[in-house]
Structures are given as structure tokens and as C-alpha cells.
Image: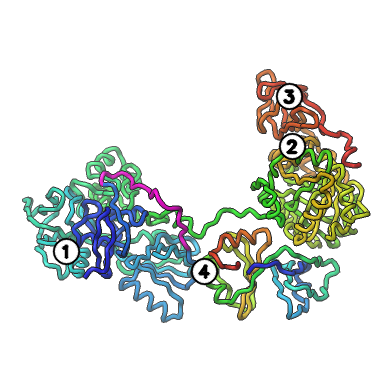
Amino acid sequence: MLEPLDCVRVVTTPAALAGAAWSPEVVVLRTAPDEAIVVGSDVPPLDDPHAIIESDRGWHGAWVEISAAETFLASAADWSLPEQRPALAQGMVAGLSVKVWIDSERALFVVSHTVADELIERLPPGWLS
Amino acid sequence: MSAGHFSYSGSSVPFEDGDSILLALTRAGVHPTGGGCLCFAGDCPHCLGTVDGVSYVRTCQVPAAELQVVFPHPLDGSEPQLPTEGGPATTPVEYRHVDVVIIGGGESGRRSELAALAQNQTVALFDAGRGEEVIGIYPGPVVVIRSAAGMIHIGCQEVVVATGASEIQPACPGNDLGGIVTARAAELLHEAGVDLGRSVAVGSPPHGVPDTPVEGRLVRFEGTDRVEAVVVEVNGDEVRHPCEAAIVGLGLYPRDGLARMGNGLPVSVVGEASAEPTIPPPPQSGTVCPCSDVTVADLESVWERGFHELELVKRATLAGTGTCQGAVCLPHIRSFLNDRGAELPAPFTARPVSRQLTLGEVAAGNHHPSFPRTALDPVHREMGAEMDRIGGWWRPWTYGDLRAEYDAVRQRVSIGDVSTLGKMRVTGPDAEAFLQLIYPTDVASIRPGRSRYVLMLNEAGYIFDDGLVSRELNNTFSLTFTSGGASHSEMWMRDWGSSYDVRIYNRTTSLGAINVTGPLASELVRRAGADELPPYMGHASAVVAGVPCQVFRLSFTGEVSFELHHPVDRSVELWETLMELGADMGILPHGLQALELLRLEKGHILVGLDTDYDSTPRRIHHDWAVNMDKGDFLGRASLLRTDQIPLDRMLVGLEMERQPVDGASLHLDGEYVGYVTSSGWSWTMDKAVMLAQLNLVGGELPDAVMVEGMLARRVPVPFYDPDGARARA
């Protein structure tokens, strides 16, 4: 079920992002070379005094089993999950921009709150709702 | 043994296990289009029908099923009727990814499948005979298939086309009679236990089918509705062979339509699909293209008029453009041209789609553009707002009483949802230098805690967006952009910022924003707990109604205004608390319709509405927002040049006694001199106010023009509170 995520947005240098010692308790969505959405609130010190680190409640997310995620994407996205684990995939799902974090067992679907309702409306009943 | 029944034109037709609709109809002695040689392979147009409301279905490719409802197409050639009952059905789509897609389940297709599997490749094989019709190969490559379960879009590394060959259809008089089948069709019918009756086989006879083979060149079929005799020419003499069915084996033609879609893609062709096409004997008379009803006489006519190339003949006659896409006529047209000495071109590129599709099938997997919603969207709808898609977002246009919303802003207090504004934060050692490049204002002179209105110019000096720059700390800035221009502006910022040591954070969807505006706005915000309010064009952090906010004091409406930027998950809480706290003040929310009028009274522009693609600051009276002395910025060189050119038009204020439509023309002495960009009826001033692009006439701006037949006077802007005393109160 899509629910608001407690996230922190980090904007910094690619080197600072790569060098950070992230807690295993958080999921780090590296959405761009200089930007990450951290699901969870634990952001370690970064080697960048100018880094922007802000609480970000603008994302909704839902965890699903990998097999369910693959079934789900087969009917809603023209791309497939990468084989690498863990990994972040970003693309259109049902015509909306979605980020998918996958580990060995689960997938986290992340979508902007601005289109979360529309995503639910576009998917078959029961998906992510 | 009947496996079930389907409905055909209201009659019940039995079918057996494995029957296609056409096979079942043939058992029942029915020809779905009245006549024409049946191929049972999906190539010809002679078995088309309407199945379960979908027209142009090749009934030979669709398994018969219980409760199916089948109708023939009108025999007079008119278009089949669209279904009149039932709503639009959504066609599901399945996306798949494999290494190799093989099209065709015949011998060569299966061989290709085994070869790919032996190399540990993932394979998907589709066969039209199983109801899997490949309708196109697209760049990727992506192969799109229509199946009974819906559409399949399958991405792959390689495509193997093993579609085999179609049988050449007869092109002679009488080829539209019933009882004519191809040799392969005859074999299929025989295996299915269908007795064709006394059959005559012309050309290569079918295997294992009892028939009477005849020698000679096919001349015509004779009969009334069904074939009664086949006439062939032998040594210059016509020989008539009476029959109940005619079987034609005239050769094969590669079924290469899909292969010809693969130019430039990793597509290989195997088996009969890759064979050289047979050139049948040139047609002498009769119908060549049954889809477009093109006869040999038509071909001769266009030949005589100079159409000697295949593509020209196709365009002149429409042969090959119908349902079967040339499967029937193309061999005969090539033979016709070849017989007259025309040079036959190499097979031309084919374009998807290869089959008629329903709108649902075309649309499967596609979605209309998304319009995001603010966190307050459900609140607006709950309040009965008329929502509209504006600036790329769903936004409240009005809550039902425009005048009441307007009065609340001008006389009391109102709140509006401005969460859609583009919002960014820029920081880093080069932040100030970077923004000096981006904006024509002197960013260095903006002190911490202060804000400034800014234009955004492209390299040509033309305005493409506007907004606010606020300095938080020495090297940290908050920026706002228009709702509709935010995405482009973000790309602009990131593009130009790539060579600066800056961090750029787009927090448009992370922050909500509520504008509190009206003479009582300060009182309401104080009531909500913000004791220290920033001065006009200042900003400060404050807790408002328990919600941490960055409070920007500005004014788009012309009244005291505070824009409360806050964590987006607190928007509803903040909105509802402000409404409660302002209840005794007569607070109302205002929508975009009221806001557009309020800002028009103040003469504030809407970029894209009041500006044009070539609007410079000078042309819209915004020179004050440009500091040419501060050093270089994007557009400066262009402004230096264009400032030397005499003005030809300007954005001006007009007023008159009746509100014209936006876009109304301006006339002076009967000549067109411009147009209205924004207009509205000002209740405060009891007259219509407008912004307009007005041409200079004789080097001067006219003092008055005619708009929709009425006199409009040019007046200074702002129309309302020209000194800004109310906004600064």
C-alpha cells in the first residue's frame, strides 16, 4: 500500500555521496549523481560542507515481494527490473514516473505524492492500494 | 462432434474442437464475405467479419468459442457498423523481455527456436495460427503482438521472421465466387473433415485431397454465387471443367511484410519468407485487388497515363492499401508491370501496423499526460472547487463564487494554494556567481532575509519565466518559478550550473505553499502564532499554526500577502487551521480565476500569457528588473543590441466600459495595432482593465484604440493601488 515515506533529500557532490558510510537501516535511492533520497532519517556525515540535507515528505512508497513486483511491472511498464541486487530503477509505470528499489527479496515502489493517487487509479484494483 | 455453438447473423453455428470461426462457417456452408478465394492463413481479405463487436477480424485466425457473436461485413462494401452497446473496453497489455523473438511457428521458426535455445538465449515464439498476430516491429527492437489476452509488447535483442509464404490468389473473372480455396486451404479443410464436393485443382494440386487436376492457364471461374466451372486455356483453346469447388495452387509469395519493417534493426528472415517471390502469369482481366476493388482494366488505365512504377500504381489505384496490405494484389501488379517491361523495385520498407487494430489495442499501455495534484487537492474538491488543469497541475479555478473570493482578498483575508510554484534551493561556494549569471538583477545586492522579483532571460534576451530570489545565508538562496515554467527552468538551471560549484535542489513537490492575503493577512498569521513577521519583500522562518514555515512576504494580489512554504505533509493541517482561525474574519479561499483578476488589477504579468516568444524586458516595461551595470548575465549581450533598436510594440494597460475577450484585436483608424493579452472586470474600479500588446504608430503609443467596437484608453499600470501602499501595509 502506498504510504507517505519518511525521507531525507541529500544534494551534494558525487564523491561525497559515494564516500558516505550509510547505515544499513536506510535505503539510499541514488536518483542522480549529485542527489539521493534517503528512506529513513539517518544521514551520516558527508564530506561536503555545502551539502543540502533536508527532510522530505514528498514521497509515497510501498514494499512488495520481488515476484509480485515483476508481475506488476509486466502489465504497467515497458522496462524490466535489473538483475543486479540491490539496485535502483527509474522509469515510467502506467505513464507516471516511478522509482523502484530492489533488494534480494523485496521491491520498494516510490512515487511523488503529487501523482500517488493517479498511479493507484491507473493500476488494476488492488495494486499498491 | 460439436464442441459448442456461436452466433452468426443471429443463427446458431456449431463448431468442433480446434475450429477457427471460418472453419466452422465453412462446415456450415457459409462464406463470410459471400465469395472470394479463401486461404485460411490470414493473408486474404475474404474471411473478414465482425467478432464480438470488433470489425475487420480475420475469422480464419480466431478460434471459435461458445457465445461468440459474429456478423458478416456488409456485402455492398460499405463500412461495418461500430458496436452501439457497451462501453469502451480496456485492452490489457503485457510487457516482456527476451533475447530472441521468433515470428512464425512453422518448420523454419521452430528450427530457429531450437538454435537460439541451444545458445542459452531466452526465446519467445509467436504464431498467427495460435491467435498471436504480430502487428509490427518497432525500433528497439520491440515486437508488438495482438493476442486473445490483449496486447504483448516484447523487447528483444534479435527478431527472426519466419512467417513463411502466402499462396498467390487467382486474379481473373469470377474470382469473387464462393467455393474457391487455395491448395493449402484445401488440405486444411480435408484434414478437418470438410468435404468440398467435386473439386477441380488448377496449378499445383494439394496433397491428399481428392480432386481433379487440370492443366492450362487459368482464364476464369464460372458460376452464379458459387463456382460451377473452371475455364482454362490449353494450346489457345478454352476448356471448361464443371465442379463444385475450385482449388488453386498458383505458387507462393514470401510473407515478408514484417521483415520489411526491420530495416536497420537486428531482424533476420528465414525459410519461405526469405525466398524470391514467384511472378505469376500477368493478369488478363478481372479483379486484382479485392480490398480496393481494382481490376486489370484499372491497371491498364493508369499505365496508359504514365504510372509505370509500383509505388505510383499503388497510389493511383489504391491497390495494396486495403485490408490485406497487398498480400493478394502485389504479386499480380508486379507481374503486370514486369510484363510491360517496367523495372521492378526491390521490396520497399513496410511500416507498422500490419493488421487492423481497435482503438483499445492501439491505446493499450498508453496513458494520458499526468497532471499532478497538490497535497491540498482533496481539500479543494471537498470544498466544491471547480478543478482545472492549469500550468501542468490540477488547481482550483473557483470555489463557486468569484465575487466573494475577490472581495475576501480585497476587503478581509483569503488563502490560496500556491504549492504548484517551482521551488528550488541553491547553495555552494559559487551560488551567488551562478545566480548572477542566471538572473538580470544584481543578486549580490540581495541581503540575507530579503527577496527580489526576477525575470529569467534566454540568450536572446527574451523572457521565459519569472519568480523570486531570496537569500537565506551568504551562499544559500531560495528560488521560486512559475508553476508551468518550473520544469524548464530547472533544466535551465542545471544546464548552466554544471560548471559552477553549486548544489541545486528542486523541492517543488517536497514543499507545500499557501498564500495568505488580504488586509487582515498579518493579523491572521499572527493569530496562527507567528509573532515576528518579515517586512515587505522579506522572508523569515516561523512556526505558523504549529507548522514550521518559511514565510515570504510579497504581493501578487496587491494586498498584504504571506507565502507560507512548509513541509508538504503538513499542508492540510495548515490550511484547515488557517480557515478556522480566520472564520470570524470572513476568510474564504480563492481560486485561480480570482487570482488572475487580482494580479491583473496590479498589472502583474503572467509569463506566457502577457509575454510573447520575443518579449524583452523593455517591451513589457520591466527594464527596472534588469541591471545592465552589474556585469554579465544570460541575455545581456542581446539586450545591449536590441536596446538600440526602436521599439515597435509594448505591453500596456488599457481600460474600457465592457470586458473584451482575451486575445481581442486592437484597432486604430481601422488598422490592426495589437491584441489583448489579459482582461477582466474590476469590481473595485467598476471598469474593464486589460493588458495588451500595442504597436507603436508613428513612433508613439496610441492613447486610445478600438477593442470589439468600443473605445479603450491607455492608462498607467498598475490599475489598482499604484503606489503599492496596500501591499506594503
**What is the distance, in whole Å, between disc 2 and disc 1 at their CAs?**
85 Å
Please give the label number shown on residue B657.
Answer: 3
**What is the distance, in whole Å, between disc 2 and disc 4 at their CAs?**
51 Å
Q: Which residue lies under the disc numbered 1?
A: B204
Residue in view at x 81 percent, y 44 percent: B586
**What is the distance, in whole Å, between disc 2 and disc 3 at their CAs?**
18 Å
Q: Amino acid at mark 1?
A: Ser
Q: Which residue lies under the disc numbered 4?
A: A74
> Residues in magenta?
B75-92
Q: Which residue lies under the disc numbered 2?
A: B403
**What is the distance, in whole Å, between disc 1 and disc 4 at their CAs?**
47 Å
Observer-nearest of B554 and B342:
B554
Residue in view at x 30 percent, y 66 percent: B272
Other residues around mark 2 within 10 Å, as few (<14) / some (14–19) / many (≥20) = few
- Residue B86 among magenta residues: yes
Can see residue B232? no
